[in-house]
Image (cartoon, rainbow, N blue to C red):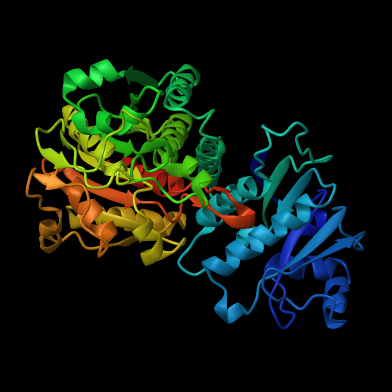
Amino acid sequence: MEFSIKPGSPEKQRSDCLVVGVFEGGKLSDAAQVLDKAAKHYLSDIIARGDMSGKAATTLLLHNVPNIASERVLLVGLGKSSEFNAKQFLDAVRAALRAVQATGAKDALFYLTELPVAQRNAAWNMTQTVIAAHETSYRFDRLKSKADKDKKPLRKIFFGAISKTDAALDATVQQAVAIAHGMNLAKDLGNLPGNICTPSHLADEALALAKTHKSLKVTVLEEKDMKKLGMGSLLSVTHGSDEPAKLITLEYRGGDKKAKPIVLVGKGITFDTGGISLKPGAEMDEMKYDMCGAASVLGTMQAIAEMGLKLNVVGIIPTCENMPSGTATKPGDIVTSMSGQTIEILNTDAEGRLILCDALTYAGKFEPDTVVDIATLTGACVIALGHVASGLFSNQQSLAQELLDAGEQSHDRAWQMPLWDDYQPLLDSNFADMQNIGGRAGGTITAACFLARFTKDYRWAHLDIAGTAWKSGKEKGATGRPVPLLTQYLINRAAAK
């Protein structure tokens, strides 16, 4: 799908479908007013007859509108003008995209991006429309015997501009395209089943990225390498699986050679049965999504490589399966992490923190400026925050605020949770330095507190994406989050430099 900005008065623009907005009460957006005047009040007459109420996210498709060069005009309801905000804008854009994609239109001209949205600007409007266009057109049908194919898929989207636009918006659009591509990669990897998307497959994907983007350098450590490094915690998770674990590192050097990198660490459990602490059977198929942290790192690395971001970034992906077998780790086993700290494993289904802690220790070798780990870590986070916000923890408030701000900018929001020392005693063990669970109460917090014990030497934040990485039910599928949040954070850091 191609995107570009097209200046000019809307009634003179040729397109398969021209998209404008209507508020409740019949108030026309600026672009719609221009069309209505050229069409001798054709639009306002239709609204007066009650065919379009302007209710949020409703649509009305018109053909052969008088004196209008475009083949179709799509009216999109914007809701009450006094309540129009970012959510209403996104709802309108998604409704418009679905309506256009249901037609035979190969291109569309959007004037919705000119709408004033509180605390947002044209760059944000265009970025969100690019991402929404990819989301509404995304299909994962590669494993079907007969793929679903659109007869006339939407190929081009133009952003209409009545007045002159800032030249920088062209770069913004291309940046948004890179983010959307990164999200699509994360979705594809998440949606693949566990018998295809194995640790070896993730390693192959990383190597393929490096072939496409010469700015990326990839190394893959095998189990024997991890054993030499003393990663007893990570390797304890893979004991029950026939699939070999991998530790994947992607290095992107887009900034000053001497600048310390930002490190992203993504949990890559390609299938999580719970191990000996076996999960219930219901919805266990969704545990193929337990590698969405890893997928988000790969998606983010692709995005920044595609946009040529002036920043040094390292992606680290510890990846393995968590399976039950005669060789699997047992509750009560004690292992030694790469840091030298010992861990009593009381529940083998709390395995994400066991692979992350060694990866976080390994991250220290890059002398990082900042480390952010991303993980589908706890079901407790879903209970706390639902499927709207990712959980955020950090050992430095300024870093937490940077990530919160990036989440607001990208509309891929996070919510900060406490990381107080008061919770640390819940992890005390009688037989080791710590245990890997802290009980039911505050499960998301104690999981973060566990990771905090391995991140004292640098700026660190943890994103728990268990509630945001995928959807269940009728809309089951990976979301590509938090690629937008992560890329926006990195864009902000590059701009600050």
Name the spot of residue 445 as percent of width and height, x first: 24, 58
Towards the viewer: 293 or 212: 293
Q: Work out whether 170 lies above or below 231.
A: below
Q: Considering the image in quadrants, where does the C terminus appear?
A: top left
Q: Work out whether 239 lies above or below 32.
A: above
- Tell me: 31 left or right of 354: right
Task: Name the image quarter holding residue 355.
Answer: top left
Q: Is residue 414 visible?
A: no
Task: Name the image quarter holding residue 424.
Answer: bottom left
- Residue sitting farthest toward the front: 326
Residue drawn 37% across and 53% down? 406
- Tell me: 393 left or right of 99: left
Q: Considering the image in quadrants, where does the N terminus appear?
A: top right
Name the spot of residue 271 as percent of width and height, x first: 44, 37
Name the spot of residue 278 as percent of width and height, x first: 39, 45
Towards the viewer: 313 or 394: 394
Residue drawn 31% across and 18% down? 222
Q: Is residue 473 visible?
A: yes
Towards the viewer: 220 or 211: 220
Residue drawn 84% across and 72% down? 43
- Tell me: 58 left or right of 292: right
Q: Work out whether 410 lies above or below 3.
A: below
Name the spot of residue 70 as percent of width and height, x first: 84, 53
- Tell me: 389 left or right of 352: right
